[in-house]
Structures are given as structure tokens and as C-alpha cells.
Image (cartoon, rainbow, N blue to C red):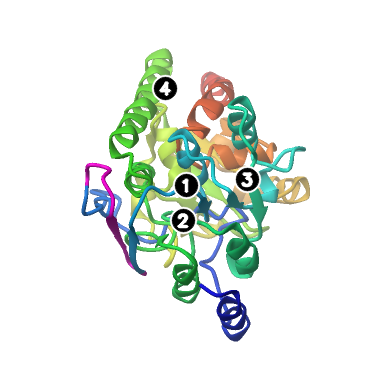
């Protein structure tokens, strides 16, 4: 697409990304917590091009093996790297990045392989179309993102763009791997990655029999007076569940907040979490954490009161534990288990 067209359209449109929950940008859109929708299949499942992948925003017709890959949203970068396709450009994520300026598992994987680190650019509402044009991608991967229809139309003029099959931020982790592996012509390798992740979780479960029948809720807050709970299908909850813990059944009784995979229940309903053995949560900063923990209703939640809480102040860890993909799972598990062990031990106090 000529640059002048992109430039003109970029300044003519007012772009808006899907709502981001507390800077993590990883909340799934509303959906049932039972059976999940199947990944949108490529019309060729053999890895032979051309392939066409449908999304709710449009079709991506990929005519040949992509060499220059650009990723948007979260998780696509890691899966592409695991499939042997280090992107030339990726959406930046400053909140979870370490001193290298990259998410640590991405930096580690690329440098260990002796590859070139991708160029990072601004995403979300301020999506940097100019840089994407300069990167000259063969395909743009965004199956777990908040890309809008307006943004998608512009991106599709640049290169075939793979968006989400249902709603923004609603693609399950195995769906995402399946979609990306098809787009890159490696569906068999994608299936292997899914099995490897499941095996890593199974090994963790086998090593922690004490987690059996331990219930948890994964909460969030946007400041004093607020309280929300992530639903079972949300990826950070899926991460914890896959380690052998059980979502507190009360979570399914809360009405889902429209456009998210969570329920904003309000601090006045904090005691409804009394049956949760553990509380998983995070805070946007240390000041917010002190304010939240000082609230009487919050402090009265049994798990909070006895210290059965898993809450890291490491933004890289918080980000990594919110994403289930081939790079985050091995990076997170060894860091997660000791934190959970400590919270479970507090149940006996």
C-alpha cells in the first residue's frame, strides 16, 4: 500500500482500542465459561499456501510463506518466536519490560538464539502505522488484541492481518497458537507447542499435590473502593488453574462486566470471597497497594486476613503470569510455585 494512503487514513480516522484492564491489556471479552469457541481454521491445514484465516474483522489471505512478521496485542510475538519466526516488529509493552526495554522472556529467547531483537512500536489507541509500513511486513498477527475495525482496515492495506475470531481479547491461549501456526504454515508445530505447554502444567500439578482442592479467586482493583474478579476463562486465571488450583465456584455467580472476562463486584461485596482459600491479585503501584490493603472491607476477606495471598510487585512477572504461551509458561512456573507454596502454607496457620 502506498505510504500516502496510510498516512492520510491514519490522520482521518479517530482510532480507539478495546478497554485495557489495569494496564495489563489482557482481559478477555465476554463469553461463556464452559465450552470455548474453536479456533478459526485456515482453509489449508497442511501448511501449504495460500491459506485464508477468517476473523470477526475480515479475512487474511496469505499467499506464501511469510518472512517478515509484525505482531500486535499480546502472545503472538512469543508464539511466532517459538515457531522459528522472530518478528521484525512488535507492539511495545513498557509496563512489563525489564531494563533491556523488552519483556524478559522475549529478550532471552531471541538473544539466546543469536537473533535480531524486533523493533518495538506504540500500539493500542496510538498504533504507529508509519513504523509498521516501514517494517514492510508479509503478515500482521493480532489474534489476541484490541485492534478496532478502523485499525484493521488500515492494517489490511499494509499486509494480510490476522485478527481475533470472536471478540477483542477473547482468544484462548491454545486458539491463539493454532491460528498463528496456521498463518505461518506450521500447524503441526503449533499442535506440538500446545502439547508441550500442557505437559509443563501437568508436571507442575504432579509436583504439588498439596494444591488439590485449594480454591482461589483472582481479583483486581483500580483504586480504593473498587473490587473486581477475573472469570475462569481469563488467561491469568487459566494459568493458575492449570497449576492445579480450583477457581472458587462463587466467581461463576457474579455478573460479567460487559466487554471483559471479569466481574466488577465492588468492595461492598468483598465478603462474598470468604470461601476462597487463596486470593491472587496485583497492584498498579506500591501506593495503590497500601491504600487497598488499608481498607477494612478488603482486609476482612479471610484469605487477605490470614495472608493466603499471591501478589507480586514485579511487573514483568505480573505480565508473564497473565499470558499463556510457549515462552511465558516455562519462564513463569518456577517463579510462581514458591509464591503459591507460601500462600498455601498460610492456610494451616
Residue displayed at 54% across by 46% down: 87
* N-term-proximal mark, 2 vs 4: 2
Q: Which residues are magenta?
A: 45-57
Task: Give the number of the disc on residue 163.
Answer: none
**Structural crowding at the residue carrying mark 1, measured as other residues with C-alpha within 10 Å and reported as few (<14), some (14–19) or many (≥20):** some
* N-term-proximal mark, 1 vs 4: 1
**Structural crowding at the residue carrying mark 2, measured as other residues with C-alpha within 10 Å and reported as few (<14), some (14–19) or many (≥20):** some
The verdict on residue 43 being magenta is: no
Residue to which mark 3 is pinned: 118
Q: Answer with the quarter of the image where residue 214 lies.
A: top left
Residue to which mark 2 is pinned: 138
Cβ–Cβ under 8 Å for marks 1 and 2: yes
Residue to which mark 4 is pinned: 211
* N-term-proximal mark, 1 vs 2: 1
State the separation of the CA atoms marked 1 and 3: 13 Å
Q: Answer with the quarter of the image where residue 61 lies.
A: bottom left
Which quadrant, please, contains the C terminus?
Answer: top right
Q: Mark 2 vs mark 3: give the one in front.
A: 2
On screen, residue 287 versus residue 312, left or right, reads right
* N-term-proximal mark, 2 vs 3: 3
* N-term-proximal mark, 1 vs 3: 1
Q: Mark 1 vs mark 3: give the one in front.
A: 1
Amino acid at each position: 500500500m502506498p505510504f500516502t494512503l496510510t498516512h492520510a487514513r491514519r490522520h482521518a480516522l479517530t482510532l480507539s482500542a478495546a478497554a485495557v484492564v489495569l494496564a495489563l491489556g489482557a482481559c478477555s471479552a465476554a463469553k461463556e465459561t464452559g465450552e470455548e469457541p474453536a479456533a478459526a481454521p485456515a482453509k489449508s491445514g497442511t501448511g501449504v499456501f495460500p491459506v485464508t484465516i477468517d476473523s470477526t474483522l475480515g479475512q487474511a489471505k496469505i499467499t506464501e510463506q511469510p518472512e517478515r512478521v509484525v505482531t500486535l496485542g499480546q502472545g503472538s510475538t512469543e508464539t511466532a518466536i517459538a515457531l522459528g519466526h522472530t518478528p521484525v516488529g512488535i507492539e511495545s509493552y513498557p509496563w512489563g519490560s525489564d531494563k533491556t526495554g523488552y519483556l524478559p522472556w522475549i529478550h532471552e529467547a531471541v538473544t539466546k538464539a543469536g537473533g535480531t531483537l524486533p523493533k518495538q512500536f506504540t500500539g493500542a489507541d496510538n498504533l504507529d502505522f508509519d513504523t509498521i509500513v516501514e517494517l514492510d511486513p508479509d503478515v500482521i498477527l493480532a489474534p489476541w488484541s484490541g485492534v478496532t475495525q478502523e485499525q484493521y482496515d488500515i492494517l489490511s492495506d499494509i499486509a494480510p492481518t490476522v485478527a481475533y475470531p470472536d471478540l477483542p481479547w477473547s482468544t484462548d491461549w491454545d486458539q491463539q497458537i493454532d491460528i498463528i501456526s496456521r498463518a505461518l504454515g506450521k500447524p503441526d508445530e503449533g499442535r506440538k507447542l500446545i502439547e508441550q505447554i500442557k505437559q509443563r502444567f501437568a508436571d507442575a500439578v504432579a509436583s504439588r499435590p498439596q494444591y488439590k482442592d485449594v480454591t482461589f479467586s483472582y481479583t483486581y482493583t483500580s483504586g480504593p473502593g473498587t473490587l473486581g474478579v477475573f472469570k475462569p476463562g481469563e488467561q491469568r486465571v487459566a494459568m493458575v488453574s492449570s497449576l492445579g488450583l480450583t477457581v472458587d465456584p462463587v466467581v461463576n455467580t457474579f455478573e460479567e462486566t460487559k466487554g471483559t472476562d471479569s466481574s466488577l463486584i465492588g468492595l461492598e461485596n468483598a465478603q462474598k470471597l470468604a470461601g476462597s482459600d487463596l486470593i491472587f491479585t496485583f497492584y498498579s503501584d506500591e501506593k495503590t497497594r497500601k491504600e487497598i490493603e488499608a481498607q477494612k472491607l478488603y482486609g476482612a476477606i479471610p484469605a487477605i486476613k490470614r495472608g493466603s495471598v499471591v501478589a507480586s510487585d514485579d511487573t514483568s512477572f505480573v505480565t508473564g503470569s497473565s499470558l499463556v504461551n510457549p515462552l511465558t509458561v516455562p519462564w513463569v512456573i518456577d517463579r510462581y510455585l514458591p509464591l503459591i507454596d507460601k500462600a498455601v502454607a498460610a492456610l494451616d496457620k
